[in-house]
Amino acid sequence: MRILRTVLLALPLALWGLAAHAGGDAAAGKAAFETSCGECHYEDDFSGESEADILAMIQSVKTGQVEHKGEAGGLSDADAANIAAFWASFK
């Protein structure tokens, strides 16, 4: 199961690697988090994870590769990058 999760996280990272490298805006990510994710997630749910790994996970959820309770499919790529930057700010 851990290997499957790693593969599922690595695939979107490969596809969206340039976006992950560019980095997001953590302040904008906080607002997007509160609107889209805050009902179910805590701000520090992914503390210690890299921004690139978090973005890959969000992209996996957006594309339906990873089952998710919430509605993340409607996030723009910019919102996803910003949320990843926000979550990565919790070290």
Image (cartoon, helix red, strand yellow):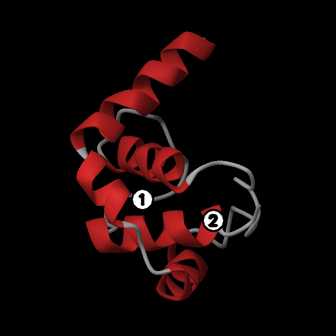
Tell me the kind of residue under disc 1.
Answer: Ala
- What kind of residue is marked 2? Trp
Residue 72's disc is 1
Secondary structure beneath dot 2 equals: helix
Locate residue 31 relative to residue 48 in the image: left or right: left
User: Total label count?
Assistant: 2
Look at the image and tell me whether residue 73 can be seen.
no
Q: Which mark is residue 23?
A: none
Secondary structure, mark 1, is: loop
Say whether disc 2 or disc 1 marks the residue closer to the N-terminus: 1
In the picture, the disc for residue 87 is 2
Residue 50 in sight in this render: yes
**Image quadrant of residue 25?**
bottom left
Q: Nearer the viewer, mark 2 or mark 1?
A: 2
Q: Position of residue 91 (x, y in %)?
A: 77, 61
**4 w.r.t. 23: above or below:** above
